[in-house]
Image (tube, rainbow, N blue to C red):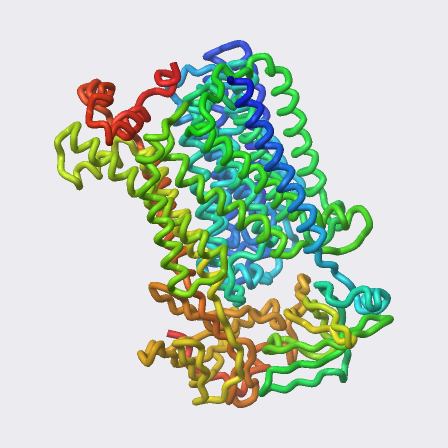
Amino acid sequence: MNSLIGSAAVTAAWLGSGVLAVLGLVAGYRRSPELLRGAKYTATFVFAAMAVALATMEWALLTHDFSVEYVANVGSLETPPYYTAISLWSSLEGSILFWAFILAAYTALVVFVQRRSTSRLLPYALGVLGIVGLFFYGLVATVASPFGVVSPAPLNGPGPNPLLQNHPLMGLHPPLLYLGYVGMAVPFAFGIAALLSGKVDEEWIRTTRRWTVTPWAFLSLGIIAGAWWSYEVLGWGGYWAWDPVENASFLPWLTATAFLHSVMVQERRGMLKTWNLTLVIGTFLLTLFGTFLTRSGVLDSVHAFTEGFIGPLFLAFIAFVTLTSLTLIAWRADRLHSPGSLDGVISRESSFILNNLIFAAFTFTVLLGTTFPLVIEAINGDRVSVGPPYFNMVSIPLGLLLLFLMGVGPALPWRRTTGERLKRSFVRPVVVGLVVATASLALGVRSPYPIITFAFAGFVMTTIVDEFRKGISARRRISGVGFFRGFGQILTRNNRRYGGYTVHAGIVVIIVALAVSGTWRFEREATLRAGEHMVLGDYTVQFDSLWAFEEPHRVVVNSAFTASRAGRLLGTIEPRMNFYSQQPNEPIATPAVRSFIDADLYLTLMAFDQQNASHATVRVIVNPGVPWLWIGGMIIAIGAILSVAPQRHRTPAVSVFAGRATEVPKTDENSGVDAERDLEPAGATSS
Amino acid sequence: MKRSKLLWGVLGGAAVVAAIGTLLVGGLSENVVYFLTPSELVARGTEAVDQPLRLGGQVKPGSVVWDAEELDLIFAVQDSVGEIGVRYTGAQPAMFREGIGVVIEGSMQGNGVFEATNLMVKHSNEYKAPHGDSIPGTMYESIIRPEVEE
């Protein structure tokens, strides 16, 4: 019954998506409000159908309906309900269903948010989302259907992959990532709509700003949650290994980040039209490529993926999107000329252009390293991998350049600047950077990369703090409020700008944490008898006892260690090893992490005495800085929420005053003008 | 004026691209890690010394020498044709045993021993119903305490 409902629902969504594609495109071409209304109803219908499909699958999972093929593959009676619910994304078919559901949800959300819009772009965008849906709902309805019927239904199943049911973060990481991935389809659809309609001005960019920042934030948090999951589950004490699966999520993040910056140049100056379209198309293609990499089996073997339908279909769709997009850009080339041009070599827009060049180079580097092994294997059958040294060698200098620009860009004015103004903006930050560098040297840091990182971080953080200070004092002057009210006002009235700076601060925190953990991590392994201890820097770890216990779906081997830091007792730390019944020979390590403000103490149980539990082998890792990775992620989340939050209505009185802000004392000219200007429609300022 | 600035921009961009391109090509060629079988590694002879490699094969039965105090592990890894002596310092992976498939990261030393920096037991994706001795509850019977967690 569940199979029948599910199959019917996804088939209905598939057909509906075809109708949506036709109605949307024709409505756009004929400028027909009636057809547009039809497209909107269809998009809502498709969403309803996918919601039914998703609910049916969840119901089948939770009620253990093993007659449904997917449930028979990933379900088991012993798996706890939480992991049963999230096993929706533990395997290919369920993931694609989830992907497709999110696409339907985003499409319906576009219809809802734009319900009063009379834009010429909307029907085309809905049509493009319909075409994307045609592919994904088609996969779910046919070759990747999770709703196949198993007859006779088995009495029990194997349960999800043990790695994916070992940590609660599995309930967070994939949905965040998918919300990010799929969300990029919306700005892509509006970009294509701009090309199709011939209305290639700034409208599509203004319409999609929140539609880009939101999936960008989900993608960022998804990547961080993935790193966290890897850290908490895999037991190697690291969080990022430049694994192809990780790179798959990082690639669209790079181009999306570049896009978030370059659109500002187009909004202000009307430049970079073709480039912005290229970036949004590239980002969407990279999300498709990422899904292809992680879901087609191509990583196991280049030759294996052609045995299934999924891989070749994905490649065909990627090729179709690429060719169509390029053709459209070529077709509209005459309208893509930029009215603006670069006025000053040192200006906000030139720093954004440099930022974009670096992001492009970064993307190319990671893409090359990720695809190189696939290409080699396809050509001559050699199995190779590209190690982290390659990625680190390129990404560290590029990352540092980007960090530096993060401090330079926001403090530079648009168009051109003067030496006087440069001095005013940068003396303090440069001094702080130099002080930080000197302090690092004095404290005994000798490797160049950490010193440069800290100096740049000090520089950038100072420019961010300065921007906030300038904004607050401008607010205080304009509306005569106190410091905290002023702070609140810049956050609510100019949330896009200060949300962006908050995101920058989060990124700086993460980069510093990466440098610290990459430089000062240390570890030791030892086999200890009960009562024996080992010493690691400040830390002492003593092995107390070991025992096992049975749960319905696994056997847990639990070890207990007593740890202390600098003589202060930290209590018991219990790393485990979990043996799941479907893979009894491949235990899943469950490290135990004790976090401090500056570092993590990380224990992994490596081996144990199986007869009398008298000894255990433990890997102890001291991971400085790592807690700040997650804190930085939370700062990014706060900044992103701020920057997409609805802007508070601005009273006309303030805007008149702000327009004359050049009259206020000279030291605050920067923020007085720039901060308020961001509130105005972009068109007004580029004139 | 505008034209010359544009030119500078283009030149600057080209310089960045060229520099990065050089870095990339150099970096890739130095950091490609080959995945070899023992016989392929034997065939490469001294050419393979000091190259970072991943070696995949089966732990030769009867070859494992394990010093639990010093965490020093010596064994041979084999395929149907050749075999290579491997030395690894660190804890044995939990399921390491004779006859099992392993992937070893490390490099060949001049003395003909493969010095491993990382040792992984090969994961098989296929599902096998647990039976007899391989049921964890039976394997670790002697250390199971009746209490349930929390």
Q: A622 or A619: nearer the eye?
A: A622
Picture quadrant where residue B93 is located: bottom right
Q: Please provide percent x and percent y for residue A654.
A: 19, 23
Q: In this view, does A414 lie to the left or right of B125?
A: left
Residue B49 seen in the figure: yes
> Is any atom of residue A5 visible in this view?
no
Quarter occupied by the C terminus of chain A = top left
Say above or below: A349 vs A8. Answer: above
Location of residue A537 with respect to A366 vertically, above or below: below
Q: Residue at x 41, y 67 (%)?
A: A600
Q: Quadrant of residue A278?
A: top right
Residue B133 point in image, percent of width and height:
64, 80
Horizontal and vertical percent for residue A458? 36, 49
Instruction: Locate residue A595 relative to residue A381 in the image: left or right.
Output: left
User: Count of labels shown?
Assistant: 0
Judging depth in this view, the residue of A363 and A393 nearest the camera is A393
Q: In this view, does A660 lie above or below B73?
A: above
